[in-house]
Amino acid sequence: MDVFIILIVVLSSFANIIADLLLVSGRNKNLKKQSSFDIAKSTSEKNIKLSAIIGAFAISLWLFVLFFLKRIEGKIGLYINLSYALFIISIVFLHISWSKIFLLAKHPNLSEHNFNKKLILYIIPSTLFCFIFSGLMIYVGVVGILKMTFLHYLLLPMFSVVLLQLLAILKIKYLDILYGSYATIAMLLSMLSIIHLIL
């Protein structure tokens, strides 16, 4: 059963990488700098809608990690499970919302400023639950409920996402082909780290 769930987590993450790449498929790789607004306008409506469907389904499957998290006993275990569930639900909401905003970018009455404001607004819930979940995991590591190594801490969502984004900013070779999917890669690493920790 454990192996089956790990397989679901990995395959759903790869599916979401495809969804991420579809969402930014209008990106012109020949341009050194291109705003999200320009990418949204260049991405076809078909790809945006397909991204929303694939992403919503794939990200929902990340809830299978609860199968492992439920092994953490006591109230703290309950809080961790609840915060993780809310975190994943908020990511589904974020992906669907961003897809809708990308579609709105095609209408002339939406300015780039308002487009960016909407993107930032919808990222707030997932960021909040990301910090709550990561904070609770740090707590169980510090008090010794789980034996966490430095790598386990580093791969918690609040750190792994930032780390991947930094690597992207530094333009690490070959990483550019995964533009738009850094957060998904970070989440995959984080989920596998959590599973490894509990197993």
Image (tube, helix red, strand yellow):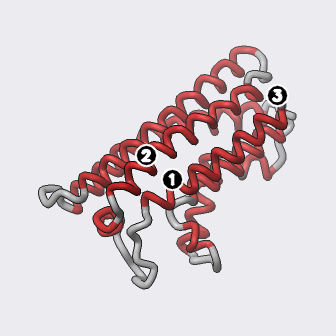
Give the CA distance from mark 1 to mark 2.
7 Å
Q: Residue beneath label 3, please?
A: 145
When asked about the image quadrant of residue 186, the answer is: bottom right
**Residue 22 screen position, x and y as percent:** 46, 59
Q: Residues within 10 Å of mark 3 (few under 14, many from 20)?
A: some
- The residue under the point 32% across, 68% down is 42
- The residue under the point 76% across, 45% down is 192
Secondary structure category for the residue under label 2: helix
Q: Amino acid at mark 3?
A: Ile
Q: Residue beneath label 1, please?
A: 19
Is residue 33 placed above or below 62 in the rendered structure?
below
Give the CA distance from mark 3 to mark 1.
36 Å
Residue 15 versus residue 82: which sits nearer the camera?
A: 15
Q: Residue beneath label 2, please?
A: 52
Is residue 67 placed above or below 148 in the rendered structure?
above
Residue 160 in view: yes
